[in-house]
């Protein structure tokens, strides 16, 4: 019971820290600090997260049949100072919508997504890939899924404006389909 209450409290804290904005059909969020990290409360202290339009959606194909559409629809997050590594960190939990296109007996959907920084101080640049697996019960048409957290080191607040990019990774048949 204590674990459930602690989990519920943590979930509400994370959910309360996110700020969403929709502009020109791009999805943005600025992740901000929690009460435990008062020096990160300023909304400008955390990086902006952008979903790349080229990687916002993929269609999964099996045996030349379109089975699922996976779309990145948002995210939650916050920043904090990690005492163990002595660095500021951004925590991002991407949200996805998985839609069944065609009736099939496939109930498990696996996909990959990335978090990337392409501009900023050299020590903070790079791309991290994450894997997700979602169970969609047979007969269900659509499921929303929040992925596990992804963490990135960020520069000391105020020293550099760093942007983080989020996107889905198409592979194999999905990539061939995406190009057509």
Image: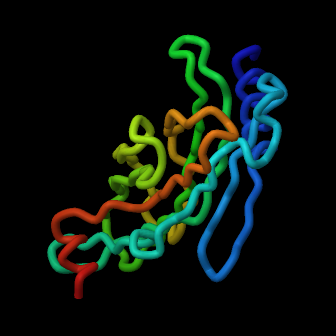
Q: Residue at x 43, y 72 (%)?
A: 57
Q: Percent position (x, y) of residue 146?
A: 57, 49
- Say which quadrant the C terminus sits in: bottom left
Q: Percent position (x, y) of residue 155?
A: 57, 36
Query: Farthest bottom residue?
Result: 180
Q: Residue at x 35, y 56 (%)?
A: 109
Given residues 171 and 157, the one toward you in this image is 157
On screen, residue 152 versus residue 8, left or right, reads left
Given residues 172 and 69, the one toward you in this image is 172
Q: Percent position (x, y) of residue 4?
A: 72, 23
- In the rendered view, would you say 91 is above or below 84? below
Q: Residue at x 71, y 26 (%)?
A: 7
Query: Farthest front residue?
Result: 159
On screen, residue 62 versus residue 128, left or right, reads left
Q: Percent position (x, y) of residue 169?
A: 32, 60
- In the rendered view, would you say 38 is above or below 121? above
Given residues 11 and 40, the one toward you in this image is 40
Q: How is the rendered protein coloured?
A: rainbow
């Amino acid at each position: 019971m204590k674990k459930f209450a602690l989990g519920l409290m943590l979930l509400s804290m994370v959910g309360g820290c996110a700020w969403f904005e929709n502009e020109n059909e791009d999805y943005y969020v600025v992740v901000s600090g929690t009460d435990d990290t008062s020096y990160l409360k300023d909304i400008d202290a955390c990086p902006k997260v952008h979903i790349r339009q080229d990687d916002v959606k993929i269609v999964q194909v099996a045996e030349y049949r379109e089975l699922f559409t996976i779309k990145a629809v948002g995210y939650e997050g916050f920043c904090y100072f990690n005492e163990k590594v002595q660095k500021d960190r951004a925590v991002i939990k991407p949200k996805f919508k998985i839609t069944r296109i065609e009736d099939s007996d496939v109930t498990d959907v696996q996909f990959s997504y990335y978090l990337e920084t392409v501009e900023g101080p050299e020590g903070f640049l790079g791309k991290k890939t994450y894997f997700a697996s979602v169970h969609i019960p047979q007969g269900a048409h659509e499921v929303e899924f929040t992925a596990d957290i992804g963490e990135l080191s960020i520069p000391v607040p105020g020293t550099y404006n760093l942007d983080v990019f989020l996107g889905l990774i198409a592979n194999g048949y999905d990539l061939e389909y995406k190009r057509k």
